[in-house]
Amino acid sequence: MMFGLSFEKLFLVAIIAGFVLGPHRLPGYAHQLAQYVRSLRNFVESTRSAAERDMGIPLQRTEWGR
């Protein structure tokens, strides 16, 4: 679960987006969203790697948010 959204809520948002955007534009927007998510993941991973390198210790994801 991310941002407090359950699978049902995400599914409902996807259905509404399908009606609002239309079936012709939806694949393009989905592709663009996927690219944004990939670039955000790459940014987070590179930032984490740089922090590990600078601090000299590995950062465990289980310890994030404490």
Image (cartoon, rainbow, N blue to C red):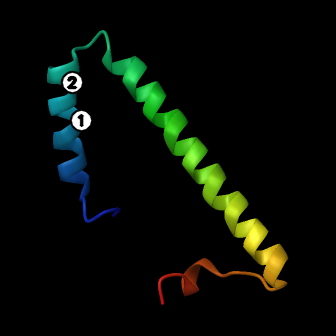
Quadrant where the image shows the N terminus: bottom left
Residue 4, picture quadrant: bottom left
Q: Secondary structure at mark 1?
A: helix
What residue occupies the far front of the structure in this picture? 54
- Dot 2 falls on a residue whose secondary structure is helix
**Total number of numbered labels?**
2
Label 2 to label 1, Cα distance in Å?
Answer: 6 Å
Indicate whether 47 appears above or below 40: below
Name the residue type under label 1: Ala
Q: Is residue 18 left or right of residue 47?
A: left
Q: Residue at x 19, y 40 (%)?
A: 13
Q: Residues within 10 Å of mark 1 (few under 14, many from 20)?
A: some
> Is 5 situated above or below 58?
above
Q: Residue 43's x, y, as percent?
A: 64, 53
When asked about the image quadrant of residue 11, the answer is: top left
Label 2 belongs to which residue? 18
Q: Residues within 10 Å of mark 2 (few under 14, many from 20)?
A: some
Residue type, numbered disc 2:
Gly
Q: Residue 52, percent across and down?
A: 77, 76
Q: Residue furthest bottom?
A: 66
Tell me, for residue 41, which label it has, or none. none
The residue at the point 65 percent across, 82 percent down is 60
Q: What residue is drawn where x is 51% and y is 39%?
A: 36
Residue 25 placement (x, y as % from top left): 32, 14
- Report the residue at 26% width, 53% height from top: 7
Instruction: Measuring from the top left, give residue 19's x and y in whole percent.
Output: 14, 22
Residue 29's place in the image compared with 45, above or below, is above
Pointers 2 and 1 in contact (C-beta within 8 Å):
yes
Q: Which mark is residue 14?
A: 1
